[in-house]
């Protein structure tokens, strides 16, 4: 329970390999700088292999969950309950012919899938997975995250342009417009957290969300008025950033076949897939860190469970939400998507900043809710009433001819 | 290899009317949402459609010419393959044309069975339509799988009745091929009784969804006059508010005995087209309930009709029915021989497709897919 006491063995378990290697190198008389570098490398390898494994697992779970929603069994032929399906998929991807269109720019066509994986891996490095488990403790972690995250757009556009083909080009155009627009609400909603935490360091942001309100409710940012709004905006904008349904326009398969991935096959295609899933993990993890208390336990008295378990449980819940939404919603159109970002998400995210300030000066608690509430509820109501006016007016009735 | 590479190195542009460069995209024939091997050459300004040219014929199989060298009876299984989702209505339209040509009476029980199977087919078609159009909007699978779950129950009924699930080959001149097996009517009643609950579920799932509203409202609407000029029929025309249903206009079969209403839309956009189909399913269920309850006893085929060496008198006949997709007609010319001199299909899918460009101009590429889905085509019927 008490953070002051020495961390338990389980708590530091993910750090064990890097410590062992570091100690071994030091005992051999290797200079400290090299030993520290080796430690970081091992930490990075652990995170990468963990998420690569989770990617394989998720590719199966996604198909299983989708199948259950659609009332069919899903993959169940390879191994017990289809558990080996990712292996089969991997072998298939590796052995497929790698087709490069004659009209493609061969170098850029090759680079794009490689480049799309890198930013996600970099972003995953700075996240705090547990009380002790922070692969790369960076004081400006949040800034770093958004900086490398912005590279994703570039590689998607690269893929679309370098394919020298029409559907990828359309997909790339959509991707640029969408991701640039949705990065704004994403960053604006994170800004509210930065304002109140007073830090850009992700581990510190999580530390500040420790403790309990009323003795049982965790003091996560989500359970404040500004945090609720910012968290919802972050989630919606995150769906768009991760190219997930209902905002999966860059690869809208019913319209532009596969968007920027149309001209890719074999392992390059798998890399796109991987980049997308790693990006999904990274964004969900950041959302958890900012709004859902990171590795903090959800109820008092559960401190004996290693903190990273809570982190990954929360990740599983968030990812399931993504899958659920994918199984349920149709896709929006480009103009609707842009209008939603610029006319709803960004104004609300901007209004949320003063409300976070009000919360700070009201000192939180009931006063904070009363002071913040009108700030958020009134504009929200005004905007939704404004946008739903057309829908509400046109409730349709149908005539019948006898 | 060098020469073509240069010409391919950039996506190809075509000139627009005022000299601007348009991106020409070939949607299809192997595109995920053209409902088969249909192709559209779309000229895009950004993502806005400036020109759209439908290209079809990839599934042409010489249906009409083959029918001219087959006997009248021999063409019935072939009609199954026109609109392969709705084989029973195809059977009926063809049988009706031959009956008109040769002046054949149909027993009452057969007429009832025809109405029952045709309305079940309408249910199948409209249910699957709801799934397909959601797929076109990007909700792959969920709605379609729910639709197919219900379709399966009706296909089971068809299998029991006709021996086949999709290619039923059930109707003959002067009636139907065989009578209902034991307990079939009760099973059909059960399916019909359970169907409204499923429709409620599907409507609740789909029709209030804001994304669906945003994607379909005011998309692809054309005035009813234009649709009439284009020869558009079926739910498409009724969604625009024009009360034209061949079941009411002609009263073929025994439809005039049944009480049902024809739902009419006011806007003619994709949303109305979806709604009209949902409402039509409710009316079909009313017909089915009545028909299954009052199904008379008696023969299912006119015993006087010669099936073999069948030679209708010299003449011509056009018969039409209200197929699930619109007015389905067969035109036959007989020269007194066992084979039709001319055999012509009026396929609703094909004719409804003719106004596709007018519906799509100025819309997004994403709308084109939804509009095409809302027309509800089956390529087997478009290309024949």
Image (cartoon, coloured by chain):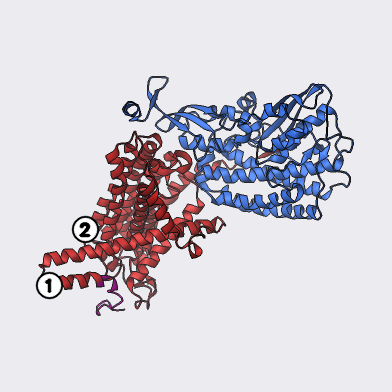
Chain colours: A red, B blue
| Sequence order check, earlier mark of 2 and 1 | 1
Q: Residue visible at 58% across and 33% down?
A: B59
Please check whether the numbered discs 2 and 1 fall on a single chain: yes
Q: Which residues are magenta?
A: A1-16
In the figure, A110 relative to B337: above or below?
A: below
In the figure, B99 relative to A312: above or below?
A: above
Q: Nearer the viewer, mark 2 or mark 1?
A: 1
Between the residue at mark 2 and the residue at mark 1, the CA separation in whole angstroms equals 33 Å
User: B365 or A183: nearer the eye?
Assistant: B365
Q: Residue visible at 17% across and 73% down?
A: A23
| Tag 1 subunit | A
Question: Is residue A89 left or right of B76 when viewed as pictured?
Answer: left
Callout 1: SS: loop
User: A268 or A186: nearer the eye?
Assistant: A268
Q: Is residue A7 magenta?
A: yes
Residue ranking furthest to the top? B18
- According to the picture, the residue beneath numbered tag 1 turns out to be A28
Callout 2: SS: loop
Q: Residue visible at 57% across and 50% down?
A: B143
Task: Residue A140: give its label.
Answer: 2
User: B323 or B360: nearer the eye?
Assistant: B323
In the figure, B191 relative to B8: above or below?
A: below
Within-10-Å neighbours for mark 1: few <14, some 14–19, many 20+: few
Which quarter shows the N terminus of chain B? top left
x, y percent for residue A291: 35, 61
Is residue A357 among what the camera can see? no
Q: Is residue B167 magenta?
A: no
x, y percent for residue A370: 38, 61
x, y percent for residue A339: 41, 41
Classified by dominant secondary structure, the portion drawn in magenta counts as: loop
Residue ranking furthest to the bottom? A5
Which quarter shows the C terminus of chain B? top right
């Amino acid at each position: 329970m008490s953070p002051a006491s020495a961390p338990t063995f389980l708590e530091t378990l993910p750090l064990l390999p890097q410590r062992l290697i570091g100690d071994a190198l030091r005992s051999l008389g290797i200079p400290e700088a090299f030993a520290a570098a080796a430690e970081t490398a091992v930490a990075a390898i652990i995170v990468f292999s963990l998420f690569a494994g989770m990617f394989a697992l998720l590719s199966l779970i996604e198909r299983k969950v989708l199948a259950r929603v659609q009332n069919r069994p899903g993959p169940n032929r390879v191994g017990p309950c289809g558990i080996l399906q990712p292996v089969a998929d991997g072998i298939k991807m590796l052995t497929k012919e790698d087709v490069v269109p004659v009209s493609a720019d061969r170098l850029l066509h090759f680079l794009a899938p490689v480049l799309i994986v890198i930013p996600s891996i970099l972003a995953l490095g700075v996240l705090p997975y547990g009380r002790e488990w922070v692969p790369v403790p960076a004081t400006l972690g949040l800034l770093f995250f958004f900086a490398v995250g912005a590279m994703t757009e570039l590689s998607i556009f690269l893929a679309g342009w370098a394919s020298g083909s029409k559907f990828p080009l359309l997909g790339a155009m959509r991707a640029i417009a969408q991701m640039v627009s949705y990065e704004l609400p994403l960053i604006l909603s994170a800004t509210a957290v930065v304002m109140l935490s007073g830090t850009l360091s992700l581990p510190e942001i999580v530390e500040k969300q420790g403790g309990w309100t009323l003795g049982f409710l965790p003091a996560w940012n989500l359970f404040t008025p500004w945090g609720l709004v910012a968290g919802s905006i972050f989630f919606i904008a995150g769906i768009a950033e991760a190219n997930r349904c209902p905002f999966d326009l860059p690869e809208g398969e019913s319209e532009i076949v596969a968007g920027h991935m149309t001209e890719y096959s074999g392992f390059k295609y798998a890399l796109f897939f991987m980049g997308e899933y790693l990006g999904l993990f990274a964004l969900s993890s950041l959302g958890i860190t900012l709004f859902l208390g990171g590795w903090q336990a959800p109820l008092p008295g559960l401190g004996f469970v290693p903190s990273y378990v809570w982190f990954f449980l929360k990740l599983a819940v968030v990812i399931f939400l993504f899958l659920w939404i994918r199984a349920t919603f149709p896709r929006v159109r480009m103009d609707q998507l842009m209008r939603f970002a610029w006319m709803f998400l960004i104004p609300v995210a901007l209004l949320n900043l003063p409300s976070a300030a009000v919360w700070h000066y009201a000192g939180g608690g009931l006063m904070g809710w009363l002071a913040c509430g009108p700030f958020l509820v009134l504009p929200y109501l005004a905007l939704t009433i404004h946008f739903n006016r057309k829908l509400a007016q046109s409730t349709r009735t149908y005539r019948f001819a006898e | 290899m060098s020469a073509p590479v240069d010409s391919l190195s950039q996506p190809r542009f075509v000139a627009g009317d005022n000299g601007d460069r348009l991106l020409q995209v070939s949607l299809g024939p192997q595109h995920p949402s053209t409902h088969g091997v249909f192709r559209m050459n779309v000229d895009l300004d950004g993502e806005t459609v400036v020109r759209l040219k439908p290209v079809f014929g990839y599934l042409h199989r010489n249906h009409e010419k083959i029918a001219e060298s087959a006997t009248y009876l021999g063409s019935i299984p072939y009609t199954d393959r026109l609109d392969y989702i709705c084989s029973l209505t195809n059977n009926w339209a063809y049988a009706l044309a031959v009956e008109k040509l040769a002046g054949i009476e149909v027993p009452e029980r057969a007429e009832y069975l025809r109405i029952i199977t045709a309305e079940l087919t309408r249910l199948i078609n409209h249910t699957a339509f709801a799934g397909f159009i959601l797929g076109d909007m990007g909700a792959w699978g969920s709605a379609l799988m729910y639709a197919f779950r219900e379709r399966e129950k009706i296909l089971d009924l068809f299998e029991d009745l006709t021996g086949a699930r999709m290619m039923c080959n059930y109707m003959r001149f002067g009636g139907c091929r065989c009578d209902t097996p034991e307990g079939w009517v009760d099973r059909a009643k059960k399916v019909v009784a359970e169907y409204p609950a499923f429709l409620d579920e599907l409507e609740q799932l789909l029709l209030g969804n804001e994304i669906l509203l945003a994607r379909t409202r005011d998309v692809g609407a054309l005035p009813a006059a234009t649709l009439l000029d284009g020869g558009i029929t079926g739910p498409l025309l009724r969604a625009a508010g024009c009360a034209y249903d061949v079941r009411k206009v002609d009263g073929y079969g025994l439809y005039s005995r049944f009480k049902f209403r024809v739902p009419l839309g006011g806007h003619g956009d994709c949303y109305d087209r979806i709604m009209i189909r949902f409402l039509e399913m409710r009316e079909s269920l009313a017909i089915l309930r009545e028909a299954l309850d009052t199904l008379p006893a008696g023969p299912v085929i006119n015993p006087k009709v010669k099936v073999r060496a069948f030679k209708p008198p010299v003449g011509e006949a056009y018969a039409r029915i209200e197929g699930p997709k619109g007015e389905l007609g067969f035109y036959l010319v007989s020269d007194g021989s066992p084979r039709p001199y001319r055999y012509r299909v009026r396929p609703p899918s094909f004719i409804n497709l003719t106004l596709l460009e007018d519906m799509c101009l100025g819309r997004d590429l994403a709308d084109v897919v939804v509009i095409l889905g809302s027309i509800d085509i089956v390529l087997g019927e478009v290309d024949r």
